Amino acid sequence: MTGWQQELERQARTRAKAGLTRTLRARAAGDAVVDLAGNDYLGLAVHPEVVGAAAEALRAYGLGATGSRLVRGSTRAHEELESDLAEWLGFPRALVYSSGFLANLGAIRALAGPGTLLVSDRYNHASIIDGCKASGAEVVVAPHADPAALAEILAARRDRPAVFVTESVFSVDGDLAPLADLHAVTSAHGALMLVDDAHALGILGPEGAGGVAAAGLAGAPDVVVTATLSKSLGGAGGVVAGPEALVRHLVDTGRTFIYDTAPPPAVVAGVRAAVRVARSADDRRRLLAERAATTVRTLSAAGFAVSTPAAGVLSVPAPGPEAALAWAADCRDRDVAVGCFRPPSTPDGSSRLRLTLNAGVGQADFDRALTVIVECAP
């Protein structure tokens, strides 16, 4: 074994001792596992209209987009989805990417660079953290969801452009950022606000238009929204929504857009159908809210300190990474899938189970899943 391989083996042993080894587990199509680990909040990944639209586009266009958006990869399906997303989110334009990760990287690099102050919430997703690092801007990590702390940071650096980046619903604990209060601060200091709406899109706001819309900020000229299309919409891809000038800039200069193969037309067509379904899915949103309340009530009664969910994601603390792994594995052995979040996926360094609720899960299965989680606790 060569020296560099030995070093990788040494690092792997260190991670294993800390309980931080990760494992890929393939699932069969149509397995009987109750899914409280995936992000298909509204159950649209298998919705007949969504699957039908994807199948029709697959027959029409074939498997892949065959190129980047600027070469050969743009189709009418892409343009129609972008138009629908812009209208739904309440912004002049929207641009679709092959993943939410790339959408965040592209948006942050477009808005910030050397000479820019980039303020990032402490609990932000890894895609935002990586985008901040790649931007070349000075990055200040702000206390979590704290408008007063943000005001102090911006007031101390009035001499340059500033961008504040936050999630709406945070991806680990599921809490909601005080977007209206944060925007009041950024607006008062002439700063832009970029909001990753991934876990709120489809769940919060009028017609499920997201956390930004719920806060009354849709279309604000100093707000930019990113989101993934892989959660409540059940597909894959990402989107940046904002003013015309931003989208033009991303098309002309955005490396994560220009040099990436376009999302497959079949996926794009399926997501477009999911948008149509999601906008009228108030019954599914109500069910999701009811299940969130039931989960908190059930697990709290069992003695767990459960986070308060703003949408469809919540967390349950575990004693440590190994205990979290064992807890999740025991649930899986009883056909219940739950998320297991350990450092570095957790911003505070604590391990926990992450539960992502799904309106497509049957009621009996959902009730059984909560029982299993309680019974398998370490």
Image (cartoon, rainbow, N blue to C red):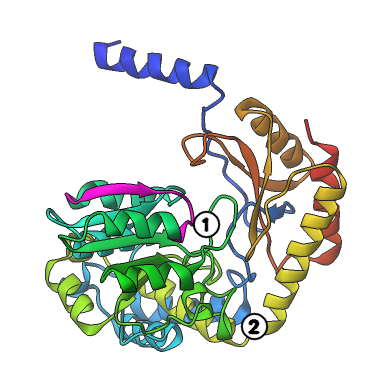
Q: Nearer the viewer, residue 84 or 193?
A: 193
Taking the spot 51% from the left edge, 66% from the top edge, the residue there is: 178
Q: Is residue 228 visible?
A: no
Q: Secondary structure at mark 2?
A: loop
The 10 Å Cα crowd at callout 1, few under 14, some 14 to 19, many 20 or more, is many
Taking the spot 34% from the left edge, 66% from the top edge, the residue there is: 194
Taking the spot 49% from the left edge, 57% from the top edge, the residue there is: 145
Is 114 placed above or below 275 here? Answer: above
Q: Name the residue beneath numbered marker 1.
A: 170
Is 240 placed above or below 213 here? Answer: above
From the viewer's perspective, is the residue at label 1 or at label 2 nearer? 1
Q: Name the residue beneath numbered marker 2.
A: 281
Please, what is the three-letter code of the amino acid marked with disc 2?
A: Ala
Question: Could you say where residue 31 lies in the image, as x and y percent from the top left?
Answer: 69, 53
Taking the spot 47% from the left edge, 70% from the top edge, the residue there is: 181
Q: Nearer the viewer, residue 27 or 326?
A: 326
Classify residue 51 as left or right of residue 127: right
Q: How many numbered callouts?
A: 2
